[in-house]
Amino acid sequence: MVWKNLVLRSINSVDGLRCVDIFQREDGGVGFARFRRDPEDPHGWRPDGPPDPRIFKDESEARAAAEAAVAWLSRENA
């Protein structure tokens, strides 16, 4: 059986073109990944780089790290 990360929260940018998913990993830790979508591309969300390699103990720790690492997320949550 292939494990798929369980998305705990998906945070979209105000313009709806970017998002950060905070997810539970197979090992029980929590991580985050960035995604983007282009209006002219009918395929929807695409990874915007690899997932952050760090493993966090919970959703709030992962969200704080995402806000520190993702410029638009920190600006929109200021």
Image: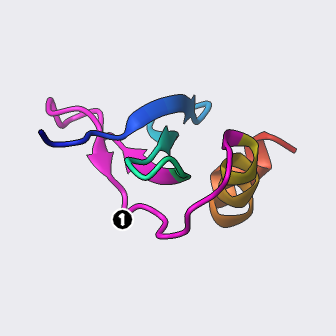
Instruction: Residue 76: give x, y in percent of width and height.
Output: 75, 41
Instruction: Residue 14: give x, y in percent of width and height.
Output: 62, 30
Q: Residue at x 77, y 50 (%)?
A: 75
Q: Quadrant of the N terminus?
A: top left
Q: Locate residue 17: give its quadrant.
A: top left
Q: Residue at x 58, y 36 (%)?
A: 13
User: What residue occupies the far right of the structure in this picture?
Assistant: 78
Residue stretch rendered in magenta on the structure? 32-59
Scheme of image coloration: rainbow
Residue annotated with mark 1: 49
Q: Is 3 part of what is drawn in magenta?
A: no
Q: Is 41 part of what is drawn in magenta?
A: yes
73 vs 46, left or right, is right
Residue 16 seen in the figure: no
Is 8 rendered above or below residue 27? Answer: above
Q: Magenta span: helix, strand or loop, mainly? A: loop
Q: Name the one closer to the observer, 9 or 43.
A: 9
